[in-house]
Image (cartoon, rainbow, N blue to C red):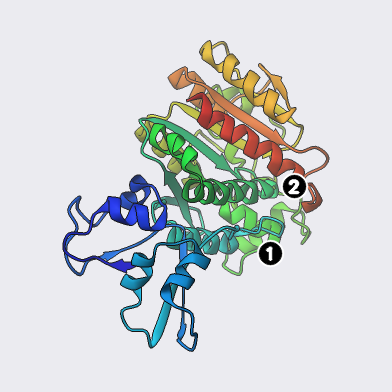
């Protein structure tokens, strides 16, 4: 951060720190176009290292080594007893190659929003156990693209992939001026973990709180191995909860009661997680939605002939950059993507990342991430 002086401008700070004006302004929504003396201005994409000065280097020498302007360092170091050196972030904060539960995700979110305060974070609802369902938003564009992950509990690697992409995107925005076009044209909405209770159950075991602890153990036939659990904490499959021929799924699904997977509930949109996702979607006017799942290396893109013509052009590009197979129709209903396509007749995609048996091993992370990032950047480009 830096303290503004009378006469300072966004253009000045952009020149000093080589950060686009749009990112500076969006990182400081509390400030007006005209800066005033003493206001605190946050500089996205930078950390600040503070230590007692014992160096004989001049500010000019330090500025050169940091690839920053001398003026910026002078402003930040009027008292040379303490040196405040801005350090441009050039590496990722997010480590996706680990068991990625809710607390890990939340810490990464908070860190990213601290260093890249143009990211907007808000709670769109809460899970059964009261965990916040969080949406991150990036960009100024009129076209809104939505991405979500971990509808299914044992597909938690999708959250790690999405969070790693968020980190790469904001890192590139603050270090590569050519990326700003995406930021200006598209607003990217991300809900990285739709099913936090389920993810925590798979990774950390049953919750302490009753009756949920006893219930999940009973549903799981007394087993403490929850690795195959897909549902939310109540045993409802969240991706069988949407009002797109839900009745067909209710009729033909084998579990007629709460289960580790596939139980669609007693009616559409009974669960707080699906209610929150439906409300977000209805309020947001998304142009495109993408739901990340595992596994199969496939991209599902049609539903009952409701998909628009442009959906095929987009999926062809996604398949090209990922090597995944585009599949127009599958015998499935009541999914989030199904409902979106049916209700709005806009492009919607379910992307089945990786291949093998769920939960996919972290050894696949690099390959999965490479395909995912290529598809997400392709989506930004087609807009």
In front of the other: label 2 or label 1?
2
Q: Whole-percent x and y of residue 15?
A: 36, 53
Q: Which residue is mark 2?
A: 366
Q: Measuring 44% from the left and 39% from the top, which residue is drawn there? A: 180
Instruction: Farthest residue to the right: give it.
Output: 356
Q: Which residue is mark 1?
A: 204
Figure check: 186 above or below 307: below
Figure check: 255 above or below 251: below
Q: Is residue 189 left or right of residue 358?
A: left
Mark 1 lies on a secondary structure that is helix
Q: Nearer the viewer, residue 236 or 135?
A: 135
Determine which quarter of the picture holds residue 186: top left
Mark 2 lies on a secondary structure that is helix
Q: Measuring 61% from the left and 69% from the top, which residue is drawn there? A: 208
Q: Whole-percent x and y of residue 338?
A: 56, 24
Q: Nearer the viewer, residue 269 or 77?
A: 77
Is any part of residue 344 visible from this angle? yes
Q: Nearer the viewer, residue 85 or 303?
A: 85
Mark 2 vs 1: CB contact within 8 A: no
């Amino acid at each position: 951060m830096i303290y503004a002086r009378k006469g300072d401008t966004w253009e000045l700070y952009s020149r000093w720190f080589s950060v686009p004006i749009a990112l500076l302004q969006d990182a400081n929504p509390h400030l007006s176009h005209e800066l005033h003396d003493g206001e605190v201005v946050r500089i996205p994409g930078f950390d600040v290292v503070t230590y007692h000065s014992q160096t004989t280097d001049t500010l000019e020498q330090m500025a050169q080594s940091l690839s920053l302007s001398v003026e910026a360092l002078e402003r930040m170091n009027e008292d040379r007893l303490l040196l405040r050196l801005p350090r441009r972030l050039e590496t990722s904060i997010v480590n996706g190659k680990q068991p990625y539960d809710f607390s890990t995700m939340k810490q990464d979110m908070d860190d990213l929003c601290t260093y890249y305060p143009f990211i907007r974070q808000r709670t769109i609802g809460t899970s059964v156990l009261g965990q916040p369902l969080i949406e991150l938003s990036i960009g100024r564009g009129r076209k809104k693209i939505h991405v979500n992950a971990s509808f299914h509990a044992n597909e938690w690697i999708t959250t790690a992939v999405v969070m790693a992409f968020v980190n790469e995107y904001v890192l590139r925005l603050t270090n590569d001026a050519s990326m700003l076009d995406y930021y200006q044209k598209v607003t990217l909405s991300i809900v990285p973990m739709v099913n936090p209770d389920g993810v925590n159950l798979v990774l950390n075991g049953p919750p302490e709180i009753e009756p949920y602890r006893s219930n999940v153990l009973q549903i799981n036939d007394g087993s403490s191995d929850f690795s195959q659990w897909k549902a939310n904490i109540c045993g409802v499959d969240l991706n069988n909860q949407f009002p797109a021929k839900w009745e067909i799924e209710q009729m033909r699904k084998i579990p007629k009661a709460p289960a580790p997977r596939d139980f669609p509930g007693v009616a559409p949109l009974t669960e707080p997680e699906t209610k929150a996702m439906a409300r977000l979607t209805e309020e947001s006017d998304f142009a495109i939605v993408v739901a990340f799942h595992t596994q199969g290396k496939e991209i599902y893109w049609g539903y009952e002939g409701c998909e628009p013509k442009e959906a095929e052009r987009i999926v062809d590009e996604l398949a090209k950059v990922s090597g995944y197979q585009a599949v127009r129709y599958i015998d499935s209903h009541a999914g989030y993507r199904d409902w979106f396509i049916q209700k709005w007749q806009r492009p919607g995609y379910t992307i089945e990342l990786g291949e093998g048996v769920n939960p996919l091993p972290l050894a696949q992370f690099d390959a999965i991430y490479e395909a995912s990032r290529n598809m997400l950047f392709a989506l930004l480009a087609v807009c």
